[in-house]
Image: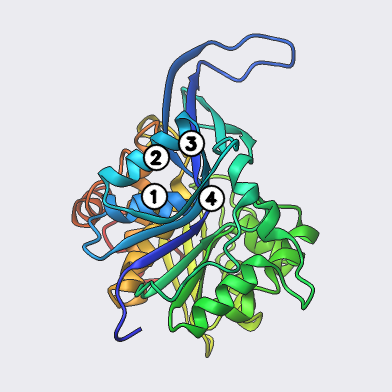
Amino acid sequence: MTTRAGVLCAGSVVADVAKVIDAYPALDHLATIEQVSTGTGGPGLNMAVDLRLLGAAFDVGMLGAVGDDLHGDLMLAACATLRIDTTGVARIPGAVTSFTDVMVERDGGRRTFFHHRGANALFDGATADLGRSSARILHAGAPGIHETMDTALPGGGNGWSALLRRARAAGMHTNLELVDLPPQRMRRLVEPCLPYVDSLVINELEAGALTGLDAPVPTADGPVDWATLERMALRLIDGGVSTLAVVHFPAGCVAAAPGGRTWRQGSVRLSRTQIRSTTGAGDAFAAGVVLGLHERWPVDRCLRLGAASAAACVTSPHTSDGIPAAGACLAAADRAGYRPTGRPGDDRGR
């Protein structure tokens, strides 16, 4: 990592079509759509966009696939505006750019996703040309929604593990992000990747599916079983993650490193009325952590920026629009304060 700089993001390129509704209807009943907007989305592209919004001064690039349609035009134009290199984004004739209809409840920001895989199903990053990239970090997101990358390879593993292995061999730090999948499928897709992953940033449901541990945190105000969540992170290290495993949830996050070292960070204290949509909050959290890793920050500072970035994200109804530069994120979070972690000295800004 000493002679490299930048982040290369590989995976999902999605057009998020956000539709703010008055309330979720019962089956066969009516909901009113109050707002409609289209923006960038997907665990691959969101990382690239959020890094730029946080003020990343290093190069940011994208590996992925879009169709030759209007949504493809919009995604590439957004990347151009943010100076995200799309040399590695294939434009596939006849394909539909992947999109998600995001139904966001007006009060509280709960959301439901209706996803069309489209061009993402055709993305093949296993043989992507990494030799031209001088990126310090390869971010991959996410197994489970890319048919080609998810397919098992004859020699073992899958497209994701092949991409991560090649990135590691090229001298990149590798970071992996996930989406919620049934536990058996999650383990089948992700376990072959873990030996080639340097950092992993996932939520408690994804971590529970991988580790077999259960510590649900349904609300930001708890209760929180911090000890079990730390065990999740430590078990991910035991599973092959080489440097840092981070598990985030509404009340905060935990992290673990080899040797048994753990960290805790509370989430930012926001009222329900401040939360417009939680869409993209996990990606925003991951972007804060990855920016800090790229800049070689201490882990506690990386986690604090992750929490601050996620908090900024949820104040907007759109996936990334609420995220300002890292300094502004941290200043706003420090003013609001952080939720307690049950460990003295961890709750700075309260």
Residue receiving disc 2: 314
* Number of on-image labels: 4
Task: Classify mark 1: residues with Cα within 10 Å, few (<14), some (14-19) or many (20+).
Answer: many
Q: CA distance from mark 3 to mark 4?
A: 10 Å
Q: Name the residue rendered at 49%, 67% in the picture.
A: 254
Looking at the rendered structure, the kind of residue marked 2 is Val
Mark 1 or mark 4: whose residue is earlier in sequence: 4
Task: Classify mark 2: residues with Cα within 10 Å, few (<14), some (14-19) or many (20+).
Answer: many
Looking at the rendered structure, the kind of residue marked 3 is Ala
Looking at the rendered structure, the kind of residue marked 4 is Ser
Residue receiving disc 1: 310
Residue receiving disc 3: 15
Q: Name the residue rendered at 25%, 60% in the picture.
A: 56
Residue receiving disc 4: 12
Mark 4 or mark 2: whose residue is earlier in sequence: 4
Residue 104 horizontal/vertical position (percent):
51, 27
Image quarter (top left, top right, bottom left or bottom right) of the N terminus: bottom left
Drawn side of residue 182 relative to residue 318, left or right:
right
In this view, the residue in front, 156 or 301, is: 156
Mark 2 or mark 3: whose residue is earlier in sequence: 3
Please say whether residue 339 is visible from this viewpoint: no
